[in-house]
Image (cartoon, helix red, strand yellow):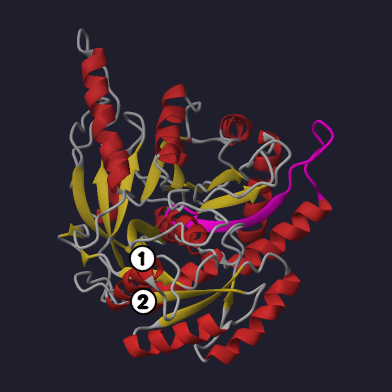
Amino acid sequence: MSEVPLGILSEDSDTGPAPVVAVVGRPNVGKSTLVNRIIGRRQAVVEDVPGVTRDRVPYDAQWNGRRFTVVDTGGWEPDAKDRAAAIAAQAEIAVQTADVVVFVVDVSVGATDVDEAAVKMLRRSHKPVILVANKADNNNLELEAVSLWSLGLGEPHPISALHGRGSGDLLDDILNALPSPPEIIEDGPRGPRRVALVGRPNVGKSSLLNRVSKEERAVVDSVAGTTVDPVDSLVEMDGELWQFVDTAGLRKRVNQASGTEYYASLRTAGAVEAAEVAVVLLDAAEPISEQDQRVLTQVVEAGRALVIAFNKWDLVDADRRFYLDKEIDRELKRIPWAIRVNISAKTGRAVDKLAPALRRALASWEQRVPTGALNQWLTALTQATPHPVRGGRAPRILFATQAGVAPPRFVLFTTGPLDAGYQRFVERKLREEFGFEGSPIEVSVKPRKKTGPGGRGKAHG
């Protein structure tokens, strides 16, 4: 997300030029702070002095998989003179060249004569305008936003650009106001979901592929390592078309062990990266091995949805089931969220459970939690179980937002660093409340940045 000169906006052959969002308003209402919040980093210069931003400054931004360009502008004033007039002219050009305009008003001050004059300028542009009531840092100020209906721009969006309050919902509304991407054809039927079939050698990957495709598409041999290159197969399961990739198991040969295993691992990693969900096959009749753990780690670190299939269940007796339960508790305790199915590729036992498990994992992988519901839950959680006191004080979580899906990514804005144990506690409770069965989730922390010794902090933008 690097800075792009205006007029040289980046283009992809798939999506065309990125749409443009202009952030405008009178001086010192927090436009640059909001731009930093949107782009996810402190890049636009922020000071409590009017006129710091003078030109149109564009930045690349992305939200929920959609990229756009956000343009920071200087403060707009009517009848401005000299340098202020040039700054206002640049802001008006930004409005004319934008697809959507975000008009920022300071809710702690209310609508001023300058704001009302800016509304007249915006109406002349005939561009979609989203009204933002900034500096709504608490519930009382949020209520003050109601008075901004008088500007005639529709519903005000109360936010705190500094602390992130309401920013997720605002970004959702910005995306809804942007023109539809001309080149993307995802409104029609989507292509088959991509499934990586992975596991150590001889766990039955090729046998499972043959079973679900109801024909011999992959070579099956009791010798480990028969499959060397990934094989793409379109397979119909449970009335739906899926794209399977049968990947190479990690095999070893005399004098070539490291090389062959290395390249097989690369092929497997590539298949996982290209997939949306991975089926990791484990041999239920054998102990969970270090190699199995490596494959599982590869999938989790790639951020893919995960279904664990315990194959060869026809070979499992009562004694083995007892020990397997113990192994699952011990070896898979870091991924209790993974969906597990017990199958036999050889006999076809429970293979019909695979498609429903894949759908559940993918639904979790693409799940989005509304910002309001997320923060209501988080407030109740932190009040019931606050962070432990460290050095005389305890960091607080100010706000949370879901930054993306596939996999779900959450950002906690805090007054200071969180203990790793407390962060894991929040993640565990997040799963208990909202599910995410079969999908990894990422929870990161953005502590408020201190402005100086004893000074009040500002949240990272």
Residue 177 in percent (x, y) is at 39, 78
Q: Residue at x 58, y 59 (%)?
A: 164
Q: Quadrant of residue 417?
A: top right
Q: Which residue is mark 1?
A: 238
Q: CA distance from mark 1 to mark 2?
A: 43 Å
221 is higher (above) or lower (below) than 406: above
Which amino acid, by three-letter code, is at mark 2? Val
* Residue lying at the far left of the rendered structure: 13
In the depicted view, which residue is nearer to us: 252 or 316?
252
Q: Residue at x 84, y 34 (%)?
A: 392
180 is higher (above) or lower (below) than 391: below
The boundaries of the magenta stretch are: 385-408
Which amino acid, by three-letter code, is at mark 1? Asp
Residue 8 in percent (x, y) is at 19, 59
Q: Is residue 170 visible?
A: yes
Left or right relative to 115: residue 343: left
At mark 2, the secondary structure is strand
Q: Residue at x 33, y 69 (%)?
A: 86
Q: Which residue is mark 2?
A: 100
Q: Quadrant of residue 246?
A: top left
Q: Nearer the viewer, mark 1 or mark 2?
A: 2
In the depicted view, which residue is nearer to us: 184 or 312?
184
- Sort mark 2 into few (<14), some (14-19) or many (20+) by Cα contacts within 10 Å: many
- Sort mark 1 into few (<14), some (14-19) or many (20+) by Cα contacts within 10 Å: few
The majority secondary structure of the magenta stretch comes to loop
